Amino acid sequence: MKIFSGRANPELALGICHYLRHPLGKMTITNFPDGEIFCKIEENVRGHDVFLLQSTCQPINESVMELLIMIDCFRRASAKRISVVIPYFGYARQDRKDEGRVPITARLVANLIQNAGADRILTMDLHAAQIEGFFNIPVDHLNAGFVLDDYFRSLNHDPEEMVVVSPDAGSIKRALSHQNRLGCSLAIVDKRRSSAHDTLQANLTGASVEGKVAILFDDMISTGGSICGAAQMVKEAGAAKVYVSATHGVLCGNAVEKMNHAPIEEIVLTDTIPLTPERTPAHVKVLSVAPLLGEAIRRIHFNESVSCLFRFQS
């Protein structure tokens, strides 16, 4: 087994290697003066089981192209199997035609990764589960939910004083999973879209949040508009504290400014996407998914069951 990393998230790759007690492979990735990407493997990989780690995050087009070049490089170097580890899968929100004359970009990216030579995909918390079906190769889809829930359990809040809040109707299934694991009640924010870029939080249904610790869960925080609007509504409904949690901290545009001004006690994210100083909100807690990904990599390499890692997803 050999593990290599692109430039999108080297810190997570080092965390995975630390968990596995395995060195990170040597590879050179640079840019030519015109911006083209150059990749060279600095050690023999012929006949090896190779794992390539690359989150397709900002700058997303650069990260995707770098991943494709890496896959092609290892295929031409005669690696026995190329497993691509994509902690954050970009373009996942363009997973269907919701209006005329638009692309299904998630399927396009899946095709590009397959055609480049990937043999297997390991990813985490896809925005839409049906993206697994866009691949004609095996996909292991992990869930970071139990990592987040373990943290909230460590805060020692009384479950009777906690309320899991779904920020919109599309997140109800995810919120129910967190509710079952944390043993608390559930509330739902009714979100209405007022335009292509703006949303309006209209109603709060379900359990009362008055005087409670409210925890909003989502798969990703992008511009922060929806989650901040939901946090504001929950706070106005009387919540004592409001926590916001997501697997992927995309945090684009003025998301950091919005979150810093929202009534949020703490923002809990994972390290699927690295945070830069200008993209780090106040009161943020970053949890590592390196052990979870590392254990999945170990099991894939030794042809062991990965399904036990899904036991917390029910």
Image: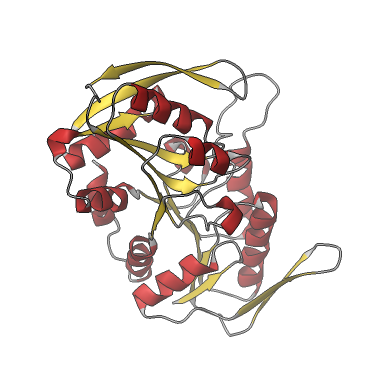
Vertical relation: 102 (above or below) 113: above
User: 305 or 284: which is nearer to us?
Assistant: 284
As drawn, the residue found furthest toward the bottom would be: 43
Residue at the image position 62 percent from the left and 21 percent from the top = 196
Residue 100 appears in which quarter of the rendering? top right
Vertical relation: 79 (above or below) 243: below
User: 311 or 211: which is nearer to us?
Assistant: 211
Residue at the image position 58 percent from the left and 85 percent from the top = 44
Q: Position of residue 168 (x, y in %)?
A: 40, 25
As drawn, the residue found furthest toward the right would be: 34
Residue at the image position 15 percent from the left and 38 percent from the top = 159
Tell whether 227 sits left or right of 143. right
Q: How many marks do you count on the picture?
A: 0
Tell whether 150 sits left or right of 233. left
User: 312 or 147: which is nearer to us?
Assistant: 147
Q: Position of residue 246 (x, y in %)?
A: 41, 44
For the C terminus, the image quarter is top left
Q: Position of residue 261 (x, y in %)?
A: 50, 37
Q: Position of residue 272 (x, y in %)?
A: 47, 55
Residue 45 appears in which quarter of the rendering? bottom right
Q: How is the model colour-coded?
A: secondary structure
For the N terminus, the image quarter is bottom left
